Amino acid sequence: MQIFTGSGKGKTTAALGAVLRAAGQGLRVHIVQFMKGTYPYGEHQALAQLPNVTVARFGHLDFVDPQNIRDEEKEEAERALMAGRKAMLSGKYDLVVLDEVNIAAAWGLVALDEVIRVIREKPGNVELILTGRYADPRLIELADLATEMVEVKHPYQKGVKPRRGFEY
């Protein structure tokens, strides 16, 4: 099991690099995206063209406010976790990515104990990747590989708005 976490850019990008590598080797991949809903992220167009790669998106168009979590946001995150668990246990996939699950757990959209349960249920023949800021130390302890992205410099510090194709 792998974790990509930290305040720096590149967590989802690193997971998608693993997806690309797995797809190139003919492996079957399923990606579950937490809190990304219907926002038009650029990777969806490219992923739709890869054989053996499927994506399920959960959440709403607006961003989650961690100080004001709504019931429907929790419901979507719980649905995402159960969809990831089902995919992982289905026997249909070699790699399952739970994109932004770390932050969903940190903000209380899903119970950390439920994420841990999913990890412990992982079959030996399935690789599992968790992404998102604020990975709990208990998740990191369970991981075989944990990478922390550290922000050194980012264009938004100079007021540069997110750019299509680079930040989304």
Image: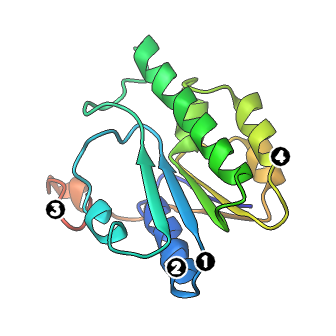
- Residue 106: % across, % down: 59, 32
Contact between labelled residues 4 and 2, with CB atoms less than 8 Å apart: no
Residue of label 4 = 121
Name the amino acid, label 3.
Arg
Callout 2: few (<14), some (14-19), or many (20+) C-alpha neighbours within 10 Å?
some
Separation of marks 3 and 1 at Cα, in angstroms? 29 Å
Name the amino acid, label 4.
Glu
Answer with mark 3 or mark 4, whichever residue precedes in sequence: 4
- Residue 128: % across, % down: 68, 59
Residue 164 badge: 3
Label 1's element?
loop
Separation of marks 1 and 4 at Cα, in angstroms? 20 Å
**Front residue of this view, candidates 29 and 117:** 29
Name the amino acid, label 2.
Ala
Separation of marks 1 and 2 at Cα, in angstroms? 5 Å
Q: What is the quadrant of residue 51 in the picture?
A: bottom left
Q: What is the quadrant of residue 58 in the picture?
A: top left
Answer with mark 2 or mark 3, whichever residue precedes in sequence: 2
Label 4's element?
loop
Contact between labelled residues 1 and 3, with CB atoms less than 8 Å apart: no
Residue of label 1 = 27
